[in-house]
Amino acid sequence: MRTLYDDLEDPVELPDEISTVVSIVPSLTESIAHTHRRLLIGATDWCSHPHDLDVTRVRGTKNPDVERIVRLRPDVVVANAEENRAIDLDALRAHGVAVWVTTPTTVEESLASLERMLSAITGDVPSWVGEAREVWSTPYAGPRRRAVIPIWRKPWMALGRDTFAGDVLARLGIDNVFVESPDRYPRIDVAALPAYDVVVLPDEPYAFSPGDGPEAFQQPAKCVSGRHLTWYGPSLVEARTVLSGQLA
């Protein structure tokens, strides 16, 4: 057994060689499956990439089936401090399951986090991590726009402070008008917004679309890929190009 430390600096007891993993975070599922699919034995119902992933489904990120996960007897469960509830992670640990928690809030932190996690679990760091770091290494040098970035409707909620998606957009010239909010995901009044130039509408977690969202705002809206905006994993390799095109 090895004692390693996750993003929360909590000790995680892992076997010398890991052969079974359950992921309860879609982006981490994709990260592991992209090069080490054989390790995955369980994932949430929301883990949609890769499309042909054939593993036991363990419900959602906010309501994982703890008993089913325990029965799978994974060497480790990979989770995220924001997407998953502490009560569920503690329940897994109480059953003797090792839990590795990530918590990045920037592109740089996400790549460092992935390096630690993948190195601990798979024994190596796949080449796409370096490719993603190279893609995002060039600073943005164009004009900047102020944006409202909703993530939910009924009630309206938006990106606030210290979010991974907010950092991604800042690197693309999009400045979040709520970046200094005391909340990471504040409720907003669409009739009383700060001055802004554009609305950025991702298709997850709420499925905003050209017909659902833009009509509520006075300024132009851009519909973007939620996966490329909010997932940290192999999607980061193409996210800069995809999002830049959608925001143009």
Image (tube, grey):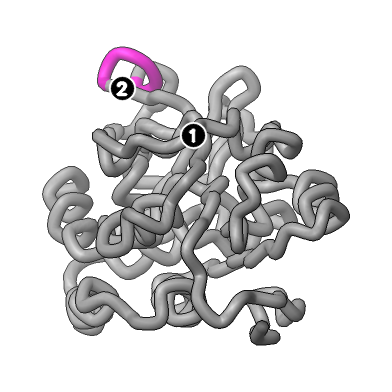
In which quadrant is the N terminus drawn?
bottom right
Residue 5, image x, y percentages: 67, 82
- Which residue corresponds to the image point at 69% horizontal and 86% vertical from the top-left? 3
Q: Nearer the viewer, residue 51 or 192?
A: 51
Instruction: Categorize mark 1 by other alpha carbons within 10 Å: few (<14), some (14-19), many (20+).
Output: some
- Which residue corresponds to the image point at 59% horizontal and 29% vertical from the top-left? 59
Q: Nearer the viewer, residue 83 or 94?
A: 94
Residue 92, image x, y percentages: 77, 51
* Residue 213 seen in the current view: yes
* Secondary structure, magenta segment, majority class: loop
Instruction: Categorize mark 2 by other alpha carbons within 10 Å: few (<14), some (14-19), many (20+).
Output: some
Of the residues shown, which amino acid type is indicated by label 2? Ser
Marks 2,1: beta carbons within 8 A: no
Identify the element where label 1 is drawn: strand
Q: Which residue is mark 2?
A: 209
Q: CA distance from mark 2 to mark 1?
A: 31 Å
- Seen as rendered, the residue at the extreme top is 211
Which residues make up the magenta segment?
Answer: 210-214
N-terminal of the two: label 2 or label 1? 1
Identify the element where label 2 is drawn: loop
Say left or right for 118 vs 38.
Answer: right
- Seen as rendered, the residue at the extreme right is 94
Q: Which residue is mark 1?
A: 56
Residue 142, image x, y percentages: 17, 70
Residue 128, image x, y percentages: 22, 72
Of the residues shown, which amino acid type is indicated by label 1? Thr
Asked if residue 86 is positioned above or below residue 215 in the image, the reply reads: below
